[in-house]
């Protein structure tokens, strides 16, 4: 158990809908990262937050957004969902802002039908 | 658990044999590399890392080799066990906090 908690584990929704994925980082970790893992592809970095502020942005679509709350948990919002958004979404956290030292949660499997 | 990488390259080994998993990285400026293990239904788990000023690093039952000349990284697992069955992928740090992840290789250990 990495200490990073993601909910829900599975989510099935229809095209055009909006969903929110939640991540609770390890205790003491200030930085949260969101990644997308599509079938047969490597992890794609989406966005990073550090102590409530956006720190880095990767290949995140405009339909997607995230935030980190004062208690350091983070939410990833995915809207106007398309079939191609079906993927595993991982959250990782680290004490400081180093992705190389991050621990991953178990992921949320999103299926868009 | 959920399956990751149904169409990834696969490596099948007999329990007790050694496994070698390969990774080609993209950026000659990458200075830090990590190998991850991802079991079905779980998130990636750090296994071992290596910096670009080294060509070999050993852990418990695992060894990472780095060949900067051909931009190649390998993970060797000694005496492979059924619990080693998973998808393994490498990641390169190309500078700052920018990590690039490979798609991975599925290792299956036959008892």
Image (cartoon, rainbow, N blue to C red):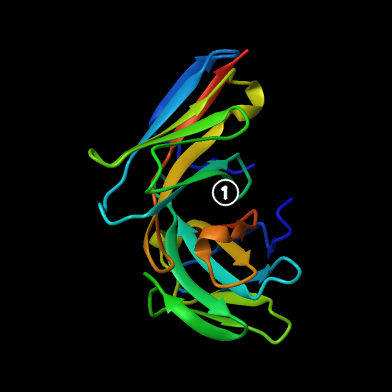
Image x and y of residue A79, in percent: 48, 77
Task: Please identify the quarter of the rendering in which residue B10 is found.
Answer: top left
Judge by depth and name the residue closer to the eye, B107 or B64. Answer: B64
Residue at (38% x, 48% y) in the render = B53
| Quadrant of image for the C terminus of chain B | top right
Any part of residue A18 in sight: no
| Quadrant of image for the N terminus of chain B | top right
Residue at (63% x, 44% y) in the render = B41
Q: Residue furthest front?
A: B53
Any part of residue A5 in sight: yes
Residue at (51% x, 17% y) in the render = B18
Number of labels in the image equals 1
Task: Please identify the quarter of the rendering in which residue A72 is found.
Answer: bottom right
Q: Along the horizontal axis of the image, is A36 left or right of A23?
A: left
* Residue under pointer 1: B44
Q: Along the horizontal axis of the image, is A8 left or right of A76?
A: right
Image x and y of residue A13, in percent: 55, 64
Q: In which chain is the residue bearing label 1? A: B
- Residue A84, above or below B21: below
Residue at (48% x, 27% y) in the render = B76
- Residue A102, above or below A33: above
Instruction: Judge the density around disc 1: few (<14), some (14-19), many (≥20) Cα neighbours within 10 Å.
Output: many
Q: Secondary structure at mark 1?
A: loop
Image x and y of residue A75, in percent: 61, 76
- Residue A51, above or below B24: below
Task: Please identify the quarter of the rendering in which residue A102 is found.
Answer: bottom right
Image x and y of residue B88, in percent: 49, 38
């Amino acid at each position: 158990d990495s200490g990073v908690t993601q909910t829900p584990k599975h989510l099935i929704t229809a095209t055009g809908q909006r969903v929110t994925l939640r991540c609770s980082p390890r205790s003491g970790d200030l930085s949260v990262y969101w990644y997308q893992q599509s079938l047969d592809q490597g992890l794609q970095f989406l966005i990073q937050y550090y102590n409530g502020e956006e720190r880095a942005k990767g290949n995140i679509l405009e339909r997607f957004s995230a935030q980190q709350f004062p208690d350091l948990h983070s939410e990833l919002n995915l809207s106007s969902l398309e079939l191609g958004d079906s993927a595993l979404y991982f959250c990782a956290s680290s004490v400081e802002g180093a992705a190389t030292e991050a621990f991953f949660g178990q992921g949320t499997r999103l299926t868009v039908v | 658990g959920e399956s990751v990488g149904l169409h990834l390259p696969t490596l099948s080994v007999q329990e007790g044999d050694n496994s070698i998993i390969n990774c080609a990285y993209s950026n000659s400026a990458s200075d830090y590399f990590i190998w991850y293990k991802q079991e079905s239904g779980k998130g990636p788990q750090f296994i071992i890392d290596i910096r670009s000023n080294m060509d070999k690093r050993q852990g418990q039952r695992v060894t990472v080799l780095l060949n900067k000349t051909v931009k190649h990284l390998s993970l060797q697992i000694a005496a492979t066990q059924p619990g080693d069955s998973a998808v393994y992928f490498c990641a390169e740090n190309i500078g700052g906090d920018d990590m690039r992840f490979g798609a991975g290789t599925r290792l299956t250990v036959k008892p």
